[in-house]
Image (cartoon, rainbow, N blue to C red):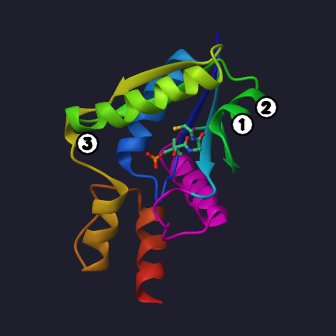
Amino acid sequence: MARAIYPGSFDPITYGHIDIVRRAKKLFSRLYVAVVANPHKSPLFTVEERVEITQAALEEAGINGLEVISFDGLLVDCARLHNADAIVRGLRANSDFEYEFQMALTNRDLASELESVFFMTAGRYSFLSSSIVKEVCRYGGDISTFVPKSVEQALEKQFRS
Ligand code: PNS
């Protein structure tokens, strides 16, 4: 079976991301969750924190046997370094399509041997994003249905400090 890389900002990881990880794990023999060091949006957590939070969240969700890594620079370079065959991304609503289409075609241009593979998130997470989670938490709302406990604690610590 093929190897895949699932890249993202993961600032922080949510149940939506975890849903995609579960789906991808069924199809790929090896899965890397790759946290980008410098996302275009300025992140709340450092890359080291995002890797740590992602690892803890996946462990809490009972998902083992994958590697959480970080990367800086081009995704295709990181994918090649890890001998990945595919790039995994999640799709929520129609609004994700244009951005994902542009990224997939750019990555194909840069590395034609890599296939982009998209998983539809579960309907109940189709509205969910890291930004929404951060906003709700910042203003004291309940985020327990959006993220695992360990992520909730990391967010609360960040906002209360
Ligand atoms: O979770 P995000 O922020 O939607 O993830 C975006 C990500 C990290 C997948 C994308 O920004 C990325 O691949 N960045 C690395 C730089 C790169 O390779 N750019 C060219 C492809 S568009």
Taking the magenta stretch, the answer to whether it contains residue 62 is yes
SS of the residue at dot 3? Answer: helix
Taking the magenta stretch, the answer to whether it contains residue 64 is no
Residue at mark 1? 78
Amino acid found under the numbered disc labelled 1:
Cys
Q: Residue at x 47, y 20 (%)?
A: 117
The magenta span reads 39-63
Q: Residue at x 42, y 42 (%)?
A: 17
Residue at mark 3? 125
Q: Residue at x 23, y 38 (%)?
A: 95
Toward which corner of the image does residue 147 lie, by quadrant?
A: bottom left
Number of other residues with Cα within 10 Å of mark 2, as a class: few under 14, some 14 to 19, many 20 or more: few
Q: Position of residue 5 (x, y in %)?
A: 61, 31
Toward which corner of the image does residue 102 lie, by quadrant?
A: top left
Q: Residue at x 45, y 61 (%)?
A: 41
Q: Is residue 19 above or below residue 55?
A: above
